[in-house]
């Protein structure tokens, strides 16, 4: 019996907190999301795809074309972060891997912690630190947040200075 469901959708909320469906999907367990630097594209990690999809954002803010960026067989992708150069970072709950998808679409393994000591069931990831070159990694399988120093500067989150 499979627990996988392909029925997710994406909501948007106005400043008053009123929500409505932005994209009806269906998504295969839509998980992490990240907005492109130019705010023209929403990247969505779909755990049961498994992989990363993108949705173009129309000029009026509505959802546009949806397409697959990368499929990651035999993984459970969970979190996502972008750097200023447009590279995409994806954390996988299983196996203990963080991938980098470069601007040319090539997939690179950034971390593969088969022992589960430093990276153990990574979920969310985000850039931070004084110069936004630190990638912070939440580890559901352990008790800590790991930090990885990168050459690239990460995109700042909304409200982050």
Image: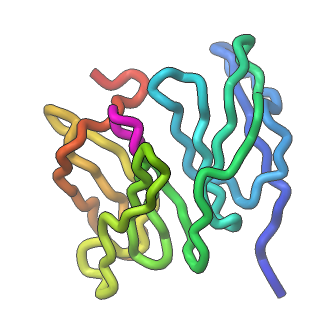
| Quarter occupied by the C terminus | top left
Above or below, 128 relative to 111: above
| Res 146 quadrant in image | bottom left
For the question of whether residue 81 can be seen, the reply is no
Looking at the picture, tell me which residue is in the foreground, 111 or 124.
111
Q: Is residue 109 visible?
A: yes
Is 81 located above or below residue 157 in the figure? below
Rendered image coloring scheme: rainbow
* Region of the chain picked out in magenta, as a range: 82-87
Q: Position of residue 29 (x, y in %)?
A: 71, 59
Name the residue located 65 percent from the left edge and 57 percent from the top edge. 46
Q: Position of residue 20 (x, y in %)?
A: 81, 28
Instruction: Say above or below: 123 vs 97.
Output: above
Looking at the rendered structure, the number of numbered marks drawn on it comes to 0
Q: Is residue 28 left or right of residue 94?
A: right
Judge left or right: residue 148 versus residue 103: left
Where is the N terminus found, in terms of image quarters? bottom right
Q: Residue at x 34, y 29 (%)?
A: 156
Residue 110 or residue 80, whichever sits in front: 110
- Residue at point 38%, 63% (across, down): 108
Q: Position of residue 41 (x, y in %)?
A: 60, 31
Question: What residue occupies the far front of the structure in this picture?
Answer: 104
Task: Answer with the quarter of the image where residue 128 lies.
Answer: top left
Q: As rendered, which of 155 and 69 lies closer to the eye?
A: 69
89 in the magenta segment: no
- Nearer to me, 103 or 35: 103
Report the side of 159 relative to 161 (left or right): right
- Does the magenta portion include 86? yes
Task: Point out residue 125 in the picture as x, y percentages from the top left corner.
Answer: 39, 52
Magenta: predominant secondary structure element?
loop
Rendered image quadrant of residue 47? bottom right
The structure residue drawn at horizontal position 27% and vertical position 50%, both measured from the top left corner, is 135
């Amino acid at each position: 019996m499979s627990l996988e469901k392909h029925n997710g959708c994406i909501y948007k909320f106005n400043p008053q907190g009123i929500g409505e469906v932005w994209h009806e999907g269906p998504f295969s367990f839509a998980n992490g999301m990240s907005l492109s630097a130019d705010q023209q594209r929403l990247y969505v990690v779909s755990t049961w795809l498994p992989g990363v999809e993108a949705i173009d954002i129309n000029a009026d803010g509505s959802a546009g074309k949806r397409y697959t960026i990368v499929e990651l067989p035999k993984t459970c992708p969970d979190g996502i972060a972008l750097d200023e150069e447009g590279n995409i970072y994806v954390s996988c709950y299983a196996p203990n891997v963080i991938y980098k998808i470069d601007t040319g679409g090539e997939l690179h393994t950034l971390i593969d912690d088969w022992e589960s000591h430093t990276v153990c069931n990574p979920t969310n990831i985000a850039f931070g630190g004084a110069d936004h070159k630190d990638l912070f990694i939440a580890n559901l399988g352990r008790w800590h947040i790991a930090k990885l120093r990168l050459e690239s500067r990460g995109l700042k989150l909304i409200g982050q200075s």
